Amino acid sequence: MFSNAKSLALIRDLADRLKVRLSANASPGINQVDESFFVDSKGASWPVLTLSQGGVVTAGSPVVVIQISNVDMVSKDIFGNQTFAYAPHLLQFGYEIGASTTFIPWPSRADLAQIQFEAQTCGCEWQLKEIANGTAATAAALNAAAAIVDIQPLYWPTKSV
């Protein structure tokens, strides 16, 4: 059993802030914010933001994908089913890395800095994921990628850091 009401409210607020911040982006910067959902392997549906240049979401395009979901409470309900906590939440932040050996991302560093600045103010556990070169930055690719950074707030009373 889960509720995605809080993750929806968080992603809506983040989308509104990013639309304002990115509206002044000059070409070829990221300038479009699209909202959708991703259904995970357990059937839970989580909100996703896809930030792109003019809606182009293909490999090699400047795209950032953000998903906010509840975290597993680590305990089961009385029927043995997985349960999700109302808080805290997990924000996954991902983009495709470039082909060079320096792992330069396809989105510009200026775009990434602006988007990351807004995303980190959500009060969520924050995971950075780099999506392999040649793979479009989508919600499915984001969920399949391993986190290279996982930052948890220090003061969650029910979770250890």
Image: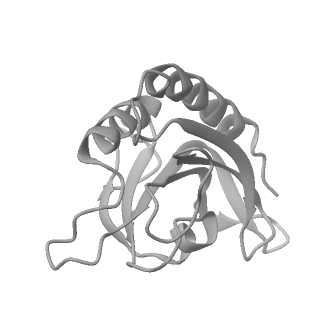
Q: Please give the name of the residue rendered at 77% of the width and 62% of the height, measured from the top-left corner.
A: 44
Name the residue furthest front: 27
The one of 68 and 84 positioned closer to us in this rendering:
68
Query: Is residue 149 positioned above or below 55 on the image?
Result: below
The one of 1 and 29 positioned closer to us in this rendering:
29
Using residue 55 as the reference point, say whether residue 61 is left or right of it.
left
Using residue 108 as the reference point, say whether residue 36 is left or right of it.
right
Q: Please give the name of the residue rendered at 34% of the width and 40% of the height, measured from the top-left corner.
A: 111
Query: Is residue 142 positioned above or below 2 on the image?
Result: below
The one of 112 and 37 positioned closer to us in this rendering:
112
Q: Please give the name of the residue rendered at 56% of the width and 70% of the height, measured from the top-left corner.
A: 143
User: x, y (%) of residue 15?
Assistant: 59, 31
User: x, y (%) of residue 67?
Assistant: 58, 52
Using residue 10 as the reference point, say whether residue 63 is left or right of it.
left
Query: Is residue 106 positioned above or below 88 on the image?
Result: below
User: x, y (%) of residue 79?
Assistant: 85, 71
Query: Is residue 121 positioned above or below 74 on the image?
Result: above
User: x, y (%) of residue 83?
Assistant: 71, 61
Tag count in the figure? 0
